[in-house]
Amino acid sequence: MTTSRQHPAVMLRYLGGFLFTLLAPLVPILISGRALPLAIILQLALSSLVVVWGVLRWRRSLWGCHGSISLRSGVLSRRESVIPSAAIACVELRRSPLFALLGANRIMIRTPSRPDDDFLTITTPRKASGDAIRSIIPLGLSAQGVTDRPAPREAAIFAASGSNFASGLLILIPVITGISKLGIDTVDRLEEGAASLFPHAPRIAAIAAAVPLVGWLAHFIHNCIVYAHFCAVRSGDTVIVRSGTISRRTVYIPHRYISATDTRRTLLLLFLRRASCSVLVSGCGSVPLISAAREAQLQSRLSSIITRPHGIRIEIAPDTANRFYLYRTRLIFAVISALLLIRLSYGTSSERFISIIFVPVTILLIWYTLIGIADSHRAKAVISGDSVEITGSRLLTVHTCRIYRTAVAEVRIKQNPLQKQRGLCDLYIRCCGQKHGISCRYVSIERAERFALMLR
């Protein structure tokens, strides 16, 4: 087997975080022009040792491909990973702006037997990436492919529907921490920004309102960048998904490793009568396929990429009289939280301060209740041809998961004491390679048992 050394840009992955941690505190000192103390000189010497270690790791890291992909690495202790080409479930090609400047790409190889966060990574020259992918996995590409490319408005709706302030804060916190290491007081700047956004609000209230807003906006901008130029291509036996404008990402998925499709509807998508769709791949998790298509166009667009099964449909769904149970508990908690918020808002100064906490809690409970109402109108489970389709809610999203029957990992019937009195149950179905499944709730126990027997 012929082996090749990885691109020198792989040293950024080995050294980037360590070097920034060591060198960032030196920037204010170098800018001020002060003399370097002994501790700083030792820090520079340690940085040099880190660079030498990274160079040694790069020179000892070799990869090759001949019927299988192998990667040998390690300086003091050697490690070799070998993956047969037939066992590769997904190949992902990534190029960040810095890698594009250096002429390199990252190739990430995943298999069904590995967890989603455990994969083999190879850094290759940009010109050699295409040949490397073709040698790693038999793609079976066709000259006449089918392409699904969303409109810019559709991509923006998809980015907005997938944005939340918590993920935005996770993006902002490392940036703020990195800027703080350069000697810039970011906390004071954030407080000044919150006061300018809400000039008439108290300081604590302004910060409490500005932080979620800035977090959501950061996540929205991040999603717009990630899903720009998004498109899905069905070429031969392979599904190719491309996305990104600053950082490019291309995912190659052999059709035989696609185990399910997951159609998602957030509150915004439900209001706009749209839905997004992802494919669930063994070992690769979820890969977006259709961004935010209209409900009337979703099935036709999805069928052009993933073949839709044909056959007799056998369906179960909650009875009309039982649909209220799907959101009853959520509605009770939402009403209690709203009443407490109103009561505290008209109380003493300390009670008004506590009411700030109940604002996001009440919003989330109302959101959760509306998702439950939407779930009550859509909940069902259907067997059709070689697949089973189940619709239910998970947290703040309504999911419709279509799983190939050969990829069904678990079918479970769950009952709580109240359901047992009424002869009802929850039908839970989980796909292979996924940690969580979907439940169709409050269906008849007799019909659920017959439905489960058909899936054996």
Image: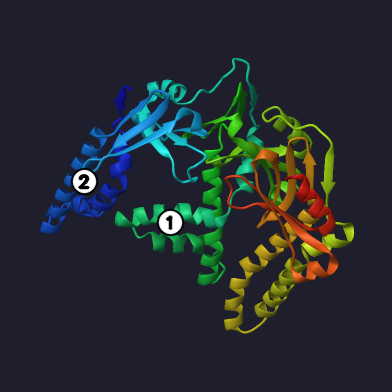
Q: Please, what secondary structure does the residue beneath circle 2 have?
A: helix
Residue that protrudes farthest toward the bottom in the picture: 348
Name the amino acid, label 2: Val
Would you say 295 lies left or right of 228 here?
right
- Please indicate, yes or no, whether residue 360 appears anywhere in the rendered image: yes
Q: Position of residue 328 (x, y in %)?
A: 78, 67
Mark positioned earlier in the residue sequence (1 or 2) = 2
Mark 1 to mark 2 CA distance (whole Å): 26 Å
Q: Position of residue 241 (x, y in %)?
A: 57, 31
**Mark 1 neighbour density, 10 Å: few (under 14) some (14–19) many (20 or more):** few
Residue at left offset 83%, top offset 60%: 323
Does residue 242 sit above or below 75 in this rendering?
above
- Please indicate, yes or no, whether residue 214 appears anywhere in the rendered image: no
Could you say which is closer to the camera, residue 98 or residue 324? Answer: 324
Which residue carries the number 2 mark?
Answer: 50
Could you say which is closer to the camera, residue 378 or residue 452? Answer: 452
Does residue 363 sit above or below 398 in this rendering?
below
Indicate the quadrant where residue 427 lies: bottom right
Name the amino acid, label 1: Ile
Could you say which is closer to the camera, residue 370 or residue 108? Answer: 108
Does residue 146 sit above or below 352 in this rendering?
above
Residue that protrudes farthest toward the top in the picture: 143
Q: Position of residue 343 (x, y in %)?
A: 69, 79
Could you say which is closer to the camera, residue 69 or residue 322? Answer: 69
Residue at left offset 17%, top offset 50%: 46
Which residue carries the number 1 mark?
Answer: 173
Locate the N terminus by quadrant.
Answer: top left
